[in-house]
Image: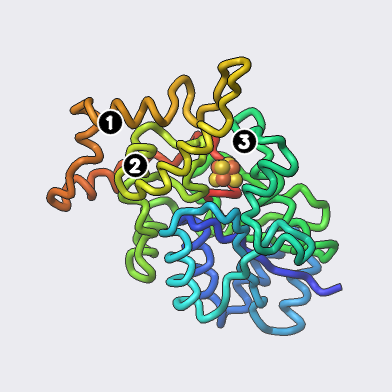
Amino acid sequence: MKTKHIIGISGGKDSAALAIHLARKDGDWRYFRDFLAESNCAVAAREIEEARRAPNIEHFFTDTGKELPEVYEYLEILEKFLGKPVLRLSPFLSGNDANAAPFDHFLWAEHGGLLPSRRQRWCTYKMKIKPMNAFVSDAPTINYVGIRADEASRSKLSSLKNVTAVYPFVRDGLVRDDIVALLEETTGLPDYYRWRSRSGCYFCFFQRKSEWLGLRRNHPDLFAKARRYEEETFDPETGRMYTWMDKMSLAELDRQAGTSPSDEAIIATDGPASWQESLLAVNLAEDDPHDHACAVCSL
Ligand code: SF4
């Protein structure tokens, strides 16, 4: 069986930059042959040598149906730049559920209304890992992963035995500044980096307080929906309610944001570009190296 070559596009900057970095090497089959040989992928290296062509890399995006609008917009920009589609993978195996929002289906039909959290992270497995594994199936696969040369961890993103993770940025010595520069000169950065440090679902529990405030300001409708999820989990018998953030509900954050000058300062002004630039700098600087958020959602 011929080797499959894939990149998972999360909507974050690193996977997008990786897709662009490798697209730029499309005419250079020797790059892929040598890189894969160095990465102990002898069969894939041999296939490239025989074909004397760079591999046809497939790009995919695992869609929870709850990503930020900026992510969907950026995917279209990236597709135009690459001149090829980013396949949208659904977690549903049958067409029957295709019209349902995946997250809501799993939340209510399979998890009894138990919202995902850092400790109960069923969302990543059901909506990111499983669709990716189904996409790969049993084909020998090279998974190009956007871990940078300045990052300590080496996430594989898949534990399937037939999937081998390789790290072009590490091999080519590209660090965060290189990735940002590469995006600035091609597609631009995804727009949400002005107020949020990573891609993923709009209600992701890995967000910091300032990011929730950014959601409130930039997408009040989505903030309200995230708040509604919390309210729907309220159990009148026990008085318990799940909250996305530790020890604070979104209703409480909403109240605080309306009265606290320090919170409001982050979100209240459209002001000069400088506040956006400084947030951008913070968001780009704080995404590593010890970020324990979900790599498959945000890399
Ligand atoms: S982005 Fe967050 S909420 Fe969405 S699937 Fe990933 S970990 Fe879960």
Name the residue carrying label 1: 257
Q: Residue at x 45, y 54 (%)?
A: 68
Residue 105: where, in percent of width, then height?
Answer: 68, 49
Residue corresponding to mark 3: 116
> Disc 1 beta carbon < 8 A from ligand 1?
no
> What secondary structure is marked by label 3?
loop
Residue tagged by mark 2?
A: 216
Relative to 191, is 47 above or below? below
Which quadrant of the figure shows ligand 1?
top right
How far apart are the two marked residues, 2 and 3, measured between alpha carbons?
A: 20 Å
Q: What residue type is labelled 2?
A: Arg
Q: Disc 1 to disc 2, how far (Cα)? A: 9 Å
Q: Which amino acid does label 1 sit on?
A: Ala
- Residue 289 visible to the viewer: no
Within-10-Å neighbours for mark 2: few <14, some 14–19, many 20+: many
- Sequence order check, earlier mark of 1 and 2: 2
Tell me the SS state at disc 1: helix
Neighbours of disc 1 within 10 Å: few (<14), some (14-19), many (20+): some
Q: Where is residue 252 in the image (x, y as percent from the top left)?
A: 37, 25
Q: Do the residues labelled 1 and 2 touch (CB within 8 Å)?
A: yes
- Give how far apart the Cα atoms at labels 1 and 3 are: 25 Å
Name above or below for residue 33 compared with residue 236.
below
Location of residue 110 in the rendering, given as x and y in whole percent from the top left corner: 75, 41
Q: Splitting the image into 4 quarters, where does residue 236 fall?
A: top right
Point out the tag, 1 or 3, that comes first from the N-terminus. Answer: 3
The amino acid type found where label 3 is placed reads: Pro
On the picture, is 209 further left or further right than 24?
left
State whether label 3 is within 8 Å of ligand 1: yes
Judge by depth and name the residue closer to the eye, 72 or 160: 72
